[in-house]
Amino acid sequence: MQRNIGIVLFIFAIPIMQVILSCMASVGDLTGLKIAIVNYEANYTNTSYQACQHPPLCRFYNLSCRYLEYLNDAIQKLYYPDPKSAIEAVKNSDVHGALYMSDNFTDALVARWALKSDVDEETLDQSEVKIWLDTADQQIKITLQQDLEGSYEAFFQDLIVKDCKSDSERFPGNPLSFKELFNTQ
Ligand SMILES: *[C@@H]1O[C@H](CO)[C@@H](O)[C@H](O)[C@H]1NC(C)=O
Ligand SMILES: *[C@@H]1O[C@H](CO)[C@@H](O)[C@H](O)[C@H]1NC(C)=O
Ligand SMILES: *[C@@H]1O[C@H](CO)[C@@H](O)[C@H](O)[C@H]1NC(C)=O
Ligand SMILES: *[C@@H]1O[C@H](CO)[C@@H](O)[C@H](O)[C@H]1NC(C)=O
């Protein structure tokens, strides 16, 4: 009987500990984290710099650039020329995650919002922010995932609700698509 109570307490403690751990994954932990960025809506220059401008207010151009501005400053952003080399960088432990947006990201995202459930496969695919995360360290994975999701939410609220003065329900669908990569090293 005594031992059963111990086991029951232990089973209940696991999800509680997971919640505490994910709450502890806060901004401070992002220092030293690196993410590989591939944005085909802008031209590749080098690892440390990519020209990526977008107009202000309620205008739908270069939304990839606008989203990237919301990523936490504590995360080091490294630019890569193509998804293949960015994924390779995750596998080699050079970065903790990789993020890719297509050359048609803005038009596809706007079309996705407009078409709602009638959206076609190609538009869905082109509007995705594809993210590969290294699963070697769960704490880092959760921290990065939460920050990327929070960044999208902030980007969306500023663009759609604040600047476009629209209802968020009229722009459904979260374009973030998370894929996991096991570290091979
Ligand atoms: C990328 O560079 C090419 C050649 O200089 C230019 O024609 C094109 O407009 C540029 N694209 C973007 C998104 O800046
Ligand atoms: C990357 O490109 C920018 C803009 O051309 C330049 O200012 C910077 O020095 C370059 N950095 C490296 C490491 O080559
Ligand atoms: C989109 O970004 C490219 C690359 O920075 C820039 O050349 C272009 O002027 C931008 N378009 C708009 C409408 O801001
Ligand atoms: C870009 O997306 C728009 C909206 O989904 C679509 O009409 C257009 O054909 C796409 N362009 C390319 C080059 O795929």
Image (cartoon, grey):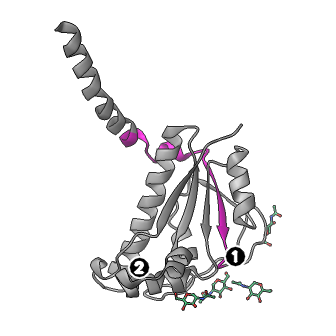
| Mark 2: amino acid | Leu
Report the residue at 73% width, 77% height from top.
43
Q: Secondary structure at mark 1?
A: loop
Residue 100 part of the magenta segment: no
Report the residue at 47% width, 89% height from top.
59
**Which circle marks residue 51 in the picture?**
1
Q: Picture coordinates of residue 105 (x, y %)?
A: 56, 79
Q: Secondary structure at mark 2?
A: helix
Q: Does residue 86 lie above or below 163 as drawn?
A: above
Q: Quadrant of residue 5?
A: top left
Report the residue at 18% width, 8% height from top.
2
Report the residue at 46% width, 55% height from top.
147
Locate the N terminus and report the quarter of the image it occupies.
Answer: top left
Q: Which residues are magenta?
A: 22-41
Which residue is nearer to you in this view: 1 or 142? Answer: 1
Q: Quadrant of residue 80?
A: bottom right
**Which residue is label 2 attached to?**
159
In the rendered view, does 153 fall on the left or right side of 3? right
Please tell me how crowded label 1 is: few (under 14), some (14-19), or many (20+) other residues with Cα within 10 Å.
Answer: few
In the rendered view, does 159 fall on the left or right side of 126? left
Which residue is nearer to you in this view: 45 or 127? Answer: 127
Q: Is residue 60 visible?
A: yes
Q: Residue furthest top?
A: 2
Q: Residue furthest left?
A: 1
* Ligand 1 lies in quarter: bottom right
Distance CA(mark 1)–CA(mark 2) = 21 Å
Locate the C terminus and report the quarter of the image it occupies.
Answer: top right
| Mark 1: amino acid | Ala
